[in-house]
Image (tube, rainbow, N blue to C red):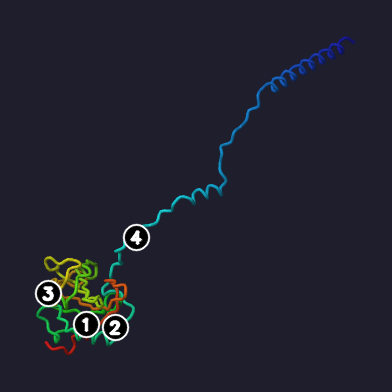
């Protein structure tokens, strides 16, 4: 039959055309230059870390004169012995509030204060504005304003063995400055009620502490001032 023969011829022609087209496509791909994909250079993680290690690491700066804020009284670890009391008695310290005698002192050293903290000082009651006196020669180690103590003075004795702490002052004496030399009996401030003292009860909070080898103005071993002046003559 002629019809099947025609179909065979048509099929053969289509196959021929497909073969030609495939050849053309293959030839075209061979003629195209190969495209090279270049990856960015990324160093291994170990190399990256090594590079970072070579950079200097900034060092935090510290303040040489920085010191923790002192509490009232200064933080301590133990108490002084009788030798300190004896030594201080031999110095015949001046009472730090003008017009007050040893007989008027009260021993408040062992009393508790805020949050149960030991007082480790004596409170010398007096009228507001009464002159506060340096108990002996020495120098002003620190003028400090604190929340509990208010306006305060830290004085070192001549040998930097003991520190004397005056707190709740109304103000400093005119011209008082850190590092200034003090003379026994010199007016250094005035009684007040700054800090956590009651405005209705102006007084001087006075403490003595034995300095450690570091001579830190805010730290030492407490000494009971009342025992230094007990039985002393007016």
Pick whichever, 195 or 152, lies toward us.
152
Q: Earlier in the sequence, mark 4 or mark 1?
A: 4
* Residue with the most extreme right position: 1
User: Going by the picture, which residue comes out furthest to the bottom?
Assistant: 231
Which of the two discs, 4 and 1, sits closer to the camera?
A: 4
Q: Residues within 10 Å of mark 1 (few under 14, many from 20)?
A: many
Q: Are marks 2 and 3 in contact (CB under 8 Å)?
A: no
Q: Secondary structure at mark 3?
A: loop
Viewer-closest of 123 and 228: 228
Residue 193 image point, x, y percent: 17, 71
Q: Which residue is mark 2?
A: 80
Q: Farthest residue in the top direction? A: 2
Label located before the other in sequence (4 or 3) = 4
Where residue 171 sits, quadrant-wise, is bottom left
The residue identified by callout 3 is 186
Sequence-wise, the earlier of marks 2 and 4 is: 4
Looking at the image, is 156 positioned above or below residue 34? below
* Labels 4 & 3 near each other (Cβ < 8 A): no
Mark closest to the chain's N terminus, 2 or 3: 2
Q: Quadrant of residue 135?
A: bottom left
CA separation in Å, label 2 and label 1: 11 Å
Question: In 3D space, how far apart are the residues under numbered discs 3 and 1 (Cα atoms)?
Answer: 19 Å
Q: Residues within 10 Å of mark 3 (few under 14, many from 20)?
A: some
Task: Please name the residue that numbered disc 1 is placed on.
Answer: 225
Which badge, 3 or 1, comes first in the chain's sequence? 3
Residue for point 84% across, 11% down = 6
Q: Specify the label residue 62 is tagged with.
A: 4
């Amino acid at each position: 039959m002629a019809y099947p023969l025609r179909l065979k011829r048509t099929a053969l022609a289509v196959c021929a055309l497909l073969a030609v087209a495939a050849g053309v496509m293959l030839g075209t791909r061979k003629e195209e230059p190969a495209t090279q994909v270049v990856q960015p250079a990324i160093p291994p993680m170990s190399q990256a870390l090594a590079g970072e290690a070579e950079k200097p690491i900034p060092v935090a700066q510290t303040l040489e004169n920085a010191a923790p804020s002192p509490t009232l009284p200064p933080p301590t670890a133990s108490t002084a012995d009788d030798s300190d009391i004896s030594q201080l008695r031999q110095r015949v310290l001046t009472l730090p509030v003008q017009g007050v005698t040893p007989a008027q002192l009260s021993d408040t050293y062992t009393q508790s204060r805020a949050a149960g903290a030991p007082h480790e000082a004596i409170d010398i009651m007096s009228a507001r504005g009464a002159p506060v006196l340096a108990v002996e020669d020495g120098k002003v180690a620190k003028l400090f304003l604190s929340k509990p103590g208010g306006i305060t003075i830290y004085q070192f004795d001549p040998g930097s063995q003991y520190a004397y702490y005056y707190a709740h002052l109304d103000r400093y004496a005119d011209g008082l400055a850190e590092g200034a030399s003090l003379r026994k009996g010199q007016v250094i401030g005035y009684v007040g009620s700054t800090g956590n003292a009651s405005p209705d009860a102006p007084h001087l909070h006075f403490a003595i502490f034995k300095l450690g080898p570091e001579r830190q103005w805010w730290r030492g071993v407490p000494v009971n001032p009342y025992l230094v002046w007990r039985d002393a003559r007016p």
